[in-house]
Image (cartoon, rainbow, N blue to C red):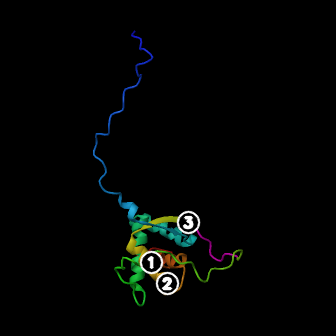
Protein backbone atom coordinates (compact mmCIF):
# COMPACT_ATOMS: atom_id res chain seq x y z
CA UNK A 1 0.00 0.00 0.00
CA UNK A 2 1.42 3.31 -1.05
CA UNK A 3 0.73 6.43 0.86
CA UNK A 4 0.03 9.70 -0.85
CA UNK A 5 1.50 12.85 0.43
CA UNK A 6 -0.99 15.58 1.37
CA UNK A 7 0.30 17.73 -1.52
CA UNK A 8 -0.69 15.21 -4.23
CA UNK A 9 -4.24 15.47 -5.61
CA UNK A 10 -6.42 12.44 -4.96
CA UNK A 11 -8.66 12.76 -7.99
CA UNK A 12 -7.71 12.66 -11.64
CA UNK A 13 -8.17 15.96 -13.50
CA UNK A 14 -11.30 16.15 -15.64
CA UNK A 15 -10.63 16.00 -19.34
CA UNK A 16 -12.10 18.45 -21.81
CA UNK A 17 -15.25 17.41 -23.63
CA UNK A 18 -14.18 15.33 -26.60
CA UNK A 19 -17.55 14.58 -28.26
CA UNK A 20 -19.20 16.67 -30.93
CA UNK A 21 -20.87 19.86 -29.77
CA UNK A 22 -24.44 20.74 -30.64
CA UNK A 23 -24.31 23.03 -33.64
CA UNK A 24 -27.99 23.94 -33.98
CA UNK A 25 -30.66 24.69 -31.44
CA UNK A 26 -33.34 22.09 -30.67
CA UNK A 27 -36.50 22.29 -32.78
CA UNK A 28 -38.90 22.76 -29.84
CA UNK A 29 -37.36 26.13 -28.94
CA UNK A 30 -38.90 27.70 -32.04
CA UNK A 31 -42.40 26.56 -31.00
CA UNK A 32 -44.82 28.74 -29.04
CA UNK A 33 -46.31 27.34 -25.82
CA UNK A 34 -50.08 27.68 -25.88
CA UNK A 35 -52.27 26.87 -22.90
CA UNK A 36 -55.42 24.99 -23.86
CA UNK A 37 -58.39 24.95 -21.50
CA UNK A 38 -60.58 22.29 -23.10
CA UNK A 39 -64.09 21.51 -21.95
CA UNK A 40 -64.16 18.10 -20.26
CA UNK A 41 -66.38 16.51 -22.93
CA UNK A 42 -64.09 17.73 -25.74
CA UNK A 43 -61.01 16.70 -23.74
CA UNK A 44 -62.37 13.15 -23.43
CA UNK A 45 -63.22 13.03 -27.13
CA UNK A 46 -59.72 14.27 -27.93
CA UNK A 47 -58.14 11.61 -25.72
CA UNK A 48 -60.20 8.89 -27.43
CA UNK A 49 -59.40 10.41 -30.84
CA UNK A 50 -55.66 10.41 -30.16
CA UNK A 51 -55.83 6.72 -29.26
CA UNK A 52 -57.89 5.95 -32.38
CA UNK A 53 -55.81 7.94 -34.88
CA UNK A 54 -52.40 7.45 -33.30
CA UNK A 55 -51.70 11.15 -33.81
CA UNK A 56 -49.83 13.16 -31.21
CA UNK A 57 -51.29 16.09 -29.27
CA UNK A 58 -49.26 18.77 -31.06
CA UNK A 59 -49.97 17.26 -34.47
CA UNK A 60 -53.71 17.17 -33.72
CA UNK A 61 -53.81 20.76 -32.45
CA UNK A 62 -51.87 21.97 -35.49
CA UNK A 63 -54.22 20.17 -37.88
CA UNK A 64 -57.37 21.28 -36.01
CA UNK A 65 -56.39 24.95 -35.84
CA UNK A 66 -55.23 25.11 -39.45
CA UNK A 67 -58.36 23.30 -40.71
CA UNK A 68 -60.54 25.68 -38.66
CA UNK A 69 -58.73 28.76 -40.02
CA UNK A 70 -59.12 27.49 -43.59
CA UNK A 71 -62.89 27.07 -43.07
CA UNK A 72 -63.52 30.59 -41.73
CA UNK A 73 -65.14 33.20 -43.98
CA UNK A 74 -63.00 34.89 -45.03
CA UNK A 75 -60.32 32.26 -44.45
CA UNK A 76 -57.23 33.16 -42.46
CA UNK A 77 -54.19 33.34 -44.81
CA UNK A 78 -52.27 30.06 -44.95
CA UNK A 79 -48.96 31.89 -44.52
CA UNK A 80 -48.91 34.64 -41.94
CA UNK A 81 -46.48 37.58 -42.21
CA UNK A 82 -43.32 37.60 -40.09
CA UNK A 83 -44.64 40.45 -37.97
CA UNK A 84 -48.01 38.75 -37.27
CA UNK A 85 -49.39 39.11 -33.75
CA UNK A 86 -48.75 36.07 -31.52
CA UNK A 87 -50.41 37.40 -28.34
CA UNK A 88 -53.54 35.42 -27.57
CA UNK A 89 -56.50 37.74 -26.90
CA UNK A 90 -58.68 37.25 -23.86
CA UNK A 91 -62.33 36.42 -24.27
CA UNK A 92 -64.24 39.71 -24.46
CA UNK A 93 -67.38 37.94 -23.17
CA UNK A 94 -65.68 36.23 -20.23
CA UNK A 95 -68.09 35.88 -17.28
CA UNK A 96 -67.34 37.73 -14.07
CA UNK A 97 -65.40 35.84 -11.38
CA UNK A 98 -67.74 33.79 -9.20
CA UNK A 99 -70.23 33.18 -12.02
CA UNK A 100 -71.36 29.52 -12.03
CA UNK A 101 -69.65 27.49 -14.75
CA UNK A 102 -72.07 26.00 -17.25
CA UNK A 103 -69.50 23.73 -18.89
CA UNK A 104 -66.62 22.33 -16.79
CA UNK A 105 -63.08 22.36 -18.14
CA UNK A 106 -60.35 19.76 -17.86
CA UNK A 107 -57.00 20.72 -16.32
CA UNK A 108 -55.12 22.99 -18.74
CA UNK A 109 -52.63 21.48 -21.17
CA UNK A 110 -49.68 23.20 -22.79
CA UNK A 111 -49.23 22.59 -26.49
CA UNK A 112 -46.28 23.94 -28.45
CA UNK A 113 -47.49 25.37 -31.74
CA UNK A 114 -45.51 26.36 -34.78
CA UNK A 115 -45.23 30.12 -35.20
CA UNK A 116 -47.50 30.24 -38.25
CA UNK A 117 -50.20 28.16 -36.55
CA UNK A 118 -50.09 30.36 -33.45
CA UNK A 119 -50.40 33.48 -35.64
CA UNK A 120 -53.38 31.95 -37.48
CA UNK A 121 -55.02 31.08 -34.15
CA UNK A 122 -54.62 34.66 -32.91
CA UNK A 123 -56.03 35.99 -36.20
CA UNK A 124 -59.02 33.61 -35.89
CA UNK A 125 -59.67 34.85 -32.33
CA UNK A 126 -59.69 38.44 -33.56
CA UNK A 127 -61.90 37.66 -36.55
CA UNK A 128 -64.44 35.74 -34.44
CA UNK A 129 -64.10 38.26 -31.56
CA UNK A 130 -63.58 35.38 -29.15
CA UNK A 131 -60.85 34.39 -26.75
CA UNK A 132 -58.35 31.59 -27.28
CA UNK A 133 -60.26 29.14 -25.08
CA UNK A 134 -63.42 29.36 -27.18
CA UNK A 135 -61.64 29.20 -30.55
CA UNK A 136 -59.43 26.27 -29.54
CA UNK A 137 -62.46 24.33 -28.25
CA UNK A 138 -64.39 25.09 -31.46
CA UNK A 139 -61.42 24.07 -33.61
CA UNK A 140 -60.80 20.78 -31.77
CA UNK A 141 -64.51 19.90 -31.74
CA UNK A 142 -64.90 20.65 -35.48
CA UNK A 143 -61.78 18.62 -36.28
CA UNK A 144 -63.00 15.62 -34.28
CA UNK A 145 -66.35 15.90 -36.07
CA UNK A 146 -64.54 16.01 -39.41
CA UNK A 147 -62.61 12.85 -38.49
CA UNK A 148 -66.01 11.33 -37.62
CA UNK A 149 -64.91 10.45 -34.10
CA UNK A 150 -67.85 9.73 -31.82
CA UNK A 151 -69.14 12.26 -29.34
Relative placement, left or right, of 109 versus 146 is right
Element type at mark 3: loop
Give the foreground label among 3 and 2.
Answer: 2
Element type at mark 2: helix
Q: Position of residue 139 (x, y in %)?
A: 47, 78
Task: Give the CA distance from mark 1 to mark 3.
Answer: 23 Å
Which residue is at the front of the view, 82 or 129? 82
The answer to whether the residue labelled 1 contacts the one labelled 3, judged by CB atoms less than 8 Å apart, is no
Image quarter hosting the N terminus: top left
The stretch in magenta equals 100-107
Residue 74 in which image quadrant: bottom left
Q: Residue furthest top?
A: 1
Residue 29 in which image quadrant: bottom left
Residue designated by label 2: 126
Q: Position of residue 91 (x, y in %)?
A: 58, 80
> Is residue 123 depicted above or below 54 in this figure?
below
> Is residue 69 depicted above or below 46 in this figure?
below
Q: Residue furthest bottom?
A: 74
Note whether residue 54 is visible. no
**Residue at (28%, 39%) from the top-left corner?**
18
Q: Main secondary structure of the magenta part?
A: loop
The answer to whether the residue labelled 3 contacts the one labelled 2, judged by CB atoms less than 8 Å apart, is no
Residue designated by label 3: 108
Task: Give the CA distance from mark 1 to mark 2.
Answer: 10 Å
**Residue at (45%, 17%) from the top-left corner?**
6
Q: Position of residue 75 (x, y in %)?
A: 39, 87
Q: Position of residue 145 (x, y in %)?
A: 45, 78
Residue designated by label 1: 85
Which residue is at the front of the view, 118 or 56? 118
Amino acid sequence: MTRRSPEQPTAEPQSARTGPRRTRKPQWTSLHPTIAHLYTDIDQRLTDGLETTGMGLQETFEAAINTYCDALEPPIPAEMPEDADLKMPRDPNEPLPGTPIDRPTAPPAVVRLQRNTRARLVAACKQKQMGGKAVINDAIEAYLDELDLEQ
